[in-house]
Image (tube, grey):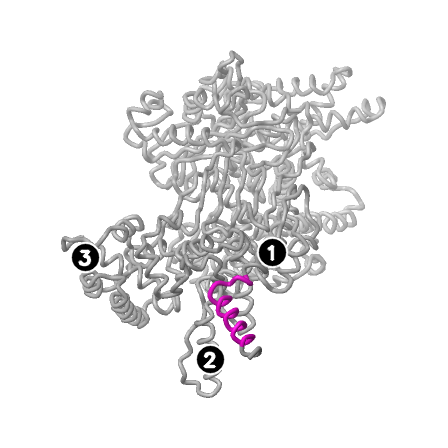
Amino acid sequence: MLLLVVVVLVGVGLWLEVRHSYGQAHVLTRYARQLTWARVDGPVAEEKRRYPAHGPYNVRLGYVDGPVYQDRLLERGYQVVQQVEWSAAARAHVDRGWSLPYDEKNQAGLTVRDCRRAPMYSFGYPYRQYEAFEAIPPRVVEALLFIENRGLLDPQRPRMNPAVDWVRFTRALLGQLGRLVDDDIDTPGGSTLATQIEKYRHSPDGRTQDARDKLRQMISASVRAYRDGAETLPFRRRLVLDYLNTVPLAAAPRHGEVHGLGDGLWVWFGLDWDESNAWLQRPRADDSAALQAQAGAWRHVVALMIAHRRPSWFLGRGPGRDALGRLTDAHLRLMAEAGLLEPALRDAALAQPLVFRDFATQPAWSPQLPSKGTAAVRNRLATQLGVSLYTLDRLDLEVHTTLNQGLQDTASAYLQQLNDPAFARRQQLLGDRLLRADTLDEVHYSITLLEATPQGNVVRLQTDTTGQPLDINEGSKLELGSTAKLRVLATYLEMVAETYERLHAMPADARQAFTPDPDDTLSRWVHGWVREHPDADLPRTLEAALERRFSARTDERFFTGGGVHTFSNFRPEDDGRNPTLREAMQESLNLPFVRLLREVARHSMYHTQGGTARLLSDLNDPRREALLARFADREGQVFLRRFWRKLEGLPPDAVRDVLLSGLRPTADRLAAVFRYLEPDAPIDAMEAFLRDRLGDATPPPARLERLYRQYAPDVLDLPDRGFVARVHPLELWLVAYRLQHPDATWEQAVQASAAERQAVYRWLFRTQAKSAQDTRIATMLEVEAFMDIHRRWARLGYPFAQLVPSLATALGSSGDRPAALAELMGIIVNDGVRRPVIRTQAMDFALDTPYETRLERRVTEEGEQVMLPEVARALRRVLAEVVDEGTARRLAGGFRLAGGEEWRLGGKTGTGDNRVVVGGRPGTAMNRTATFVFSLGPRHFGTVTAYVVGPQAARHRFTSALPVQVLRQLGPQLLPYLDPSSEQACPRAPLS
């Protein structure tokens, strides 16, 4: 009798536990309370935190790769300032293979904020969500529970464990046992909504691998259910909300992964989310049209609830869609039999087909086009983290930038109005050297504005009017005209300062006895100045250097770039002038800067490693052969190493592209290079190569055959081929070597190039014709001089791997980027210190989760001194004169802040007209640009660029007066966001 009572009591207890989960609620609630974590300052030791190892949800939001991302950012100047520390119980729980319970986000993604924490870009994914359980139409809840988890929301069972439906679990278990006997036995599933969510979020690949994996899902879901206490009805409602918002529904073309009912309806069926929910919220419609709309929404919702079982099969093209339609019909009938659907609504739903989106004609692409500023942030961050933009947008990441949203909006709105003739006229942008009313829509604008801070140069504004992913500031190579004169002048003043310091380091008697080389006019002038003004300090010397006069005459023929060239000034009336450098800079005269760059190049020839020009000048030195041999080997390795570093790590296609990017394309030059790089290629391949680079200027077949024979591998040796191509022969050799031996080491390249290094220099002295010898010597010396000039420019932020070795570089022929010019201006503003350009201040990974980490930029007030402070100050004075008295005089007087303080400007203008040259004459226009690089007040600087791309550029005659006028009109609107006393300005640290 006692045994019977015990059995009955045990049975009743088991029934109550299965039905109401009293014991589970008590035990699991106490257990879940121990699974805690806390946010603490500084990095947390690895043993006190954990990251998930798998699960589609954890992968998509970046939790799995969180440690990898953090390591990459630490390498790039960030530091962890806050992180989450886990309790011992939480660590032990995860170490057992279970998921940690916390409030998981149904919608997450990249958020970009400005310097005042205002949102600039927010990628909430999935896109369409129910905000709360109460927002879900009751019909949808009933349908979901009928299909997946009946009784889940039973209010009579307040402590029910939603992770386990014991009846379904037992039936599924018996089915699995039956399959051991007969494989044909159908086995029903035992999953609840709670375990399904656990599976598709946290199991490897979102699948149940085996029985142990199913047990892990059940345990994790059970603990999660009791995290907030023994009463689970609120959690069960959250389960319904979570499932509908996040259920995976395969992936669609041009969209990617699809999650949640809302995105599923829009992506797969093209149904509007809000409209569908409105129909589902209404009682049964009376009129026929409304009934059809309601039935259509209902049918497609039920179809997606079924499709989750095999989403790729049911939703992809093929027989799966027909099977989904049949299953949907069956479920509609069952729901009607259960009283969930009125017969009229059932019949209307059965009568309608599933209508899938046609992705070819109606792609499911819902982009959020970011502003150029946030696009630059996203592109850099994707590179830093090593992920695609698609992946980046779906990370649980909040980025705090230095940009000012108000500044962005104001500048963008202004620039967008410039294609309106009435607005352009009011802004005084129409007229000579400005714009024409009938071509306004062809001109695009770009503006970048930075602020100098102790931590770096922070970007406050970056926008343009293209509406395209390409960032004209940083993603292009443009001929920006006379802005190159600023780089030439900076190099000149640096050389003057170096020579001044070198002379002052000599003893007085040695300085008096020193005689500069006759062709090194820069050294000769500094030497003469120091001798006549022994007490002059460096600033005074630099001011005197700016007062030197360089002729603007245009009748001289210049041997440069391997040939004889002439240059012209913008205004013919300037041709007879003999201005000072200061005057030439103010008025942007061309010829004085061509002559100045020639002086700089000659100075470089005498002061590069080995003093190339000096070594080759003495033809009677008996040690000539030995000196030349050592020179060839030493100098050859120097240049070879520079080329090696330029090509290091590049794939073969990129190696060839780097060489060609510095080549001014002509048929002869390209043919000479092609026949060397691909000696066995047929003439058809050479024709395709030339056509790809010359387009309509490709030579006709007869000349192609001559070029093919003329530049055959056995016709020219390496030095002659380099001379024809106007590239350093060792660079040409190394490119060919890398194409043939992509895995070669530096040591192997040095060993393989021994003969070539000798040939490149020794051949110069074996030609019989003195004039040919002199020509080739001059060409080689100029190439090497421009390599030294490029090294100097690169230290000041020049973005490209090489310069065109021609005096035309003084007028912009080597190209530049607005962002690189802004960096040069930053160096000048910062007294010669090159500080990093900063767009991102801090990042918050996984906010309000157990994986939360905050990273901030490491604070450092040290930069790299790349220019003498005295040189930077001299340049600032010259640039201020360009505004006050020169080509940017429209901005003379500066801008006045609300408090009365005046911010003056300095800057340099430049106009570029880039055309394909055919037969020595300008042909098809490629682009036209006008740029103004400027400083504003004590700490702001940037660029304004106007440009036209394509053949229509030929219709435009605007000059740098256009960006100057744009800044004149726009500047006062920007001041409230820059004025440190304004509430609209970014918070900032004092400038040291």
Q: Which mark is residue 30?
A: 1
Residue 451 shown left or right of residue 888 in the figure: right
From mark 1 to mark 2, how far is it between C-alphas? 32 Å
Label 2 sits on residue: 174
Q: Can residue 823 be spotted in the picture?
A: yes
Residue 797 covered by magenta stretch: no
Q: Residues within 10 Å of mark 3 (few under 14, many from 20)?
A: some
State yes or no: discs 3 and 1 in contact (Cβ < 8 Å).
Answer: no
| Amino acid marked by disc 1 | Arg
- Viewer-side residue, 336 vs 711: 336
Instruction: Give the residue drawn at x 37%, y 41%.
Output: 950
Most extreme residue toward the left, as rendered?
287
Where in the figure is residue 448, as x and y percent of width and height?
49, 32
Label 1: element kind: helix
Q: Main secondary structure of the magenta part?
A: helix
Q: Is residue 758 above or below residue 617?
A: below
Q: Earlier in the sequence, mark 1 or mark 2?
A: 1
Between circles 3 and 1, the one closer to the viewer is 1
- Viewer-side residue, 696 vs 765: 696
State yes or no: discs 3 and 2 in contact (Cβ < 8 Å).
Answer: no
Q: Is residue 830 above or below residue 334?
A: above
Q: Is residue 181 above or below residue 34?
A: below
| Amino acid marked by disc 2 | Leu
From mark 3 to mark 2, how far is it between C-alphas? 43 Å
Magenta residues span 5-24
Label 3 sits on residue: 292
Instruction: Give the residue drawn at x 42%, y 62%.
Output: 684
Where in the figure is residue 919, as x and y percent of width and height?
41, 43
Label 2: element kind: helix
